[in-house]
Amino acid sequence: MSGKIIDGKALAAEIKKDLKEKIGDLKTKPKFAIVLVGRNEASEIYVKNKQKAALEVGIESVLYAFDEKATQKELENLIEKLNKDCSVNGILIQLPLPESLDGQALIEKIDVQKDVDGFCPLNIGRFECGCRNTLVAATPKGVLRLLENAGVKLEGKSALVIGRSNIVGKPMAMLLLEKNCTVTVAHSATQNLPELVRQADIVVSATGRAKMIKGSWLKKGAVVVDVGISRDGNGKICGDVDFESALDVASYITPVPGGVGPMTIAMLLENVLEAYLKQNA
Ligand code: NDP
């Protein structure tokens, strides 16, 4: 058996096309602000990609770039200013931040209506309490969209989420639970990972451990979504899953690159439009 590759790039392109049409009908352009602190090559690439994609669909983006000496107060002042600025519909803080800063405190300063990353505790809490009128983190939202678009049945399935970060693993587990999966969350202290993987109908991995999950661990026909982004021994970009061996066992699998990554950006843009529409209702 050879698994079907879920093409995140193609679905993201469709979503962006749809967004562009919707945005073309608006009187003003949605706009979001990106706060970037310090020099981190990966973050700089992510920010560039987000701005490029925004431009493609007609969303305006403004970058506030600070050097690593930026203070908590300076950033708080900027967020307060952006919160008050009616022309700004969304605010995102590019993570990771330098260790000298309290990122969580900054995220909590963002107006919940402008929290297009869906990282504010109020947005997370509202979602967990069953409120669906809230901004949801882009990466897990994108994973769910990929699964649904591929026609994967979720109800009653056993899902394993590997990783428990606030931005991927935890919201992912909540979204799958919401879709009536029976969800297990694994992390670095999990003892029997290969065994848990073997029992799962759906595996979503977000650890950043290059090619950690082997095809031989998977249940035959499992659906595999690889969120991880790392480099292998040859410096080539790869995911958490050993793609070659997993492809023979999985029924569906996302590649890295070209799977979850493009969907994260598409979902961010969707969140910016959602925030704009709510603010202008
Ligand atoms: P974090 O480092 O915040 O979290 C990683 C998680 O993986 C932690 O919960 C950690 O456990 C767990 N973990 C680490 N090692 C193991 C292991 N050996 N077995 C089981 N669990 C393990 O990362 P993020 O959640 O921010 O990102 C995860 C990956 O996804 C990264 O590669 C990142 O680059 C990528 N990413 C990709 C995106 C995309 O759009 N494609 C978007 C966001 C992230 P513990 O909590 O115990 O430390």
Image (spheres, helix red, strand yellow):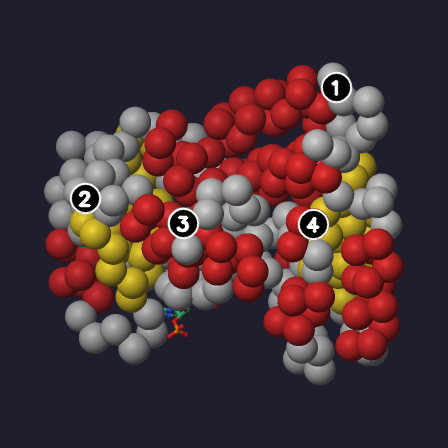
Vertical order, 216 against 269 (above or below): below
**Residue under pointer 1:** 24
Q: Nearer the viewer, mark 2 or mark 3?
A: 3
Query: Percent from the top left, x then y, of residue 101?
Result: 71, 78
Q: Earlier in the sequence, mark 1 or mark 4?
A: 1
Q: Position of residue 248 (x, y in %)?
A: 20, 39
Q: Are marks 2 and 3 in contact (CB under 8 Å)?
A: no
Mark 2, secondary structure of its residue: loop
Q: What separation in Å lies between label 1 and label 3 (alpha carbons)?
A: 32 Å
Residue at 14% from the left image edge and 63% from the top image edge: 195
Q: Which residue is mark 4?
A: 114
**Amino acid on which the number 4 mark rests in the picture:** Lys
Residue 180 pos. (x, y %):
25, 44
The reply to whether callout 1 and callout 4 are in contact (CB within 8 Å) is no
Label 2 vs 1, first from the N-terminus: 1
For the residues labelled 4 and 2, say whether their Cβ atoms are less than 8 Å apart.
no
Dot 4 or dot 3, earlier in sequence: 4
User: Quick check: is the Cβ at mark 1 less than 8 Å away from ligand 1?
Assistant: no
Secondary structure beneath dot 1 equals helix
Q: Quadrant of ligand 1?
A: bottom left
Estimate the x, y position of residue 279 in percent, counting from the top left: 72, 39
Query: Could you say whether the residue bearing mark 3 is in a helix, strand or loop?
Result: loop
Q: Is residue 188 visible?
A: yes
Label 1 is placed on what type of residue?
A: Gly
Quadrant occupied by the N terminus: top left
